[in-house]
């Protein structure tokens, strides 16, 4: 696994318009783990890609009427089978964290990389997802010198009043041990 020009070479690239320039290119110092499934608790299909590319049809599911106008994206999505899609180059600011704070620093999008796991907070993640997440994380740690193991967190930790992902089904011990 390799990163070139701020893109993961092994990932399929689908550019999202929901990004912009970071205030400081070299300040990538946080990794945020999220989860998403569209419709909720359903896996497969291309609804996540549609959401991140602003083309989600609100008539495809009642839940989509609530979210189809959101302008959001993550840098990466890791599917249940382990496939990886990149939406935003790592040197760009993806719109994944929203109102957030880590170690007293607000606006986490400015200095973080966001990785979405296709999943639900109450359904265990797949072995393939843990393996890919560990592999991607090791490459990110080697590529971006301000990123370190202590600066890896869940969306719930940077936006605790609003978010609960990746949820109780995410095995933080398993993930952290896989980085050693």
Image (cartoon, grey):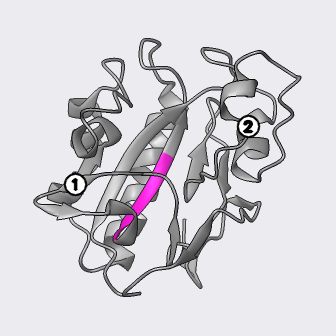
* The one of 77 and 128 positioned closer to us in this rendering: 77
- Disc assigned to residue 101: 1
Examine the structure image and report whether residue 71 is included in the region drawn in magenta.
no
Q: Main secondary structure of the magenta part?
A: strand
Crowd around label 1: few <14 · some 14–19 · many ≥20 (10 Å) = some
* The one of 115 and 73 positioned closer to us in this rendering: 73
Counting the numbered discs, the total is 2
Question: Marks 1/2: CA distance?
Answer: 26 Å
Q: Marks 1 and 2: CB-CB under 8 Å?
A: no
Left or right: 29 in relation to 92: left
Quarter of the figure that contains the N terminus? bottom right
What secondary structure is marked by label 2? loop
Left or right: 118 in relation to 99: right
Where residue 118 sits in the image (x, y, percent)? 58, 32
The residue located at (26%, 32%) in the rendering is 161
The residue located at (36%, 18%) in the rendering is 169
The residue located at (48%, 28%) in the rendering is 127
Where residue 9 sits in the image (x, y, percent)? 65, 70
Q: Residue 77, relative to residue 60: is it above or below?
A: below
* Residue occupied by mark 2: 68
Q: Residue 163, relative to residue 177: is it above or below?
A: above
Where residue 111 sits in the image (x, y, percent)? 33, 71
Where residue 62 sits in the image (x, y, percent)? 76, 15
Q: Residue 62, relative to residue 67: is it above or below?
A: above
Magenta span: 111-115
Labels 1 and 2: the sequence-earlier one: 2
What secondary structure is marked by label 1? strand
* Rendered image quadrant of residue 36: top right
* Rendered image quadrant of residue 61: top right
- Disc assigned to residue 117: none
Crowd around label 2: few <14 · some 14–19 · many ≥20 (10 Å) = some
């Amino acid at each position: 696994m390799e990163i070139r020009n701020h893109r993961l070479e092994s990932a399929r690239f689908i550019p999202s318009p929901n990004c912009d320039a970071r205030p400081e290119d070299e300040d990538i110092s946080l990794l945020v783990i999220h989860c998403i499934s569209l419709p909720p608790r359903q896996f497969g299909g291309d609804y996540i890609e549609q959401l991140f590319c602003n083309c989600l049809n609100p008539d495809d599911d009642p839940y989509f009427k609530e979210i189809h106008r959101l302008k959001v994206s993550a840098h990466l999505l890791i599917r249940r089978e382990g496939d990886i899609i990149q939406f935003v180059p790592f040197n760009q600011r993806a719109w994944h964290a929203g109102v957030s704070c880590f170690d007293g620093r607000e606006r986490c999008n400015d200095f973080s990389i966001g990785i979405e796991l296709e999943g639900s907070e109450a359904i265990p993640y797949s072995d393939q997802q843990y393996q890919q997440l560990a592999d991607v994380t090791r490459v990110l740690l080697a590529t971006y010198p301000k990123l370190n193991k202590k600066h890896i967190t869940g969306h719930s930790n940077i936006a605790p009043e609003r978010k609960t992902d990746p949820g109780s089904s995410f095995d933080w011990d398993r993930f952290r041990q896989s980085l050693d």
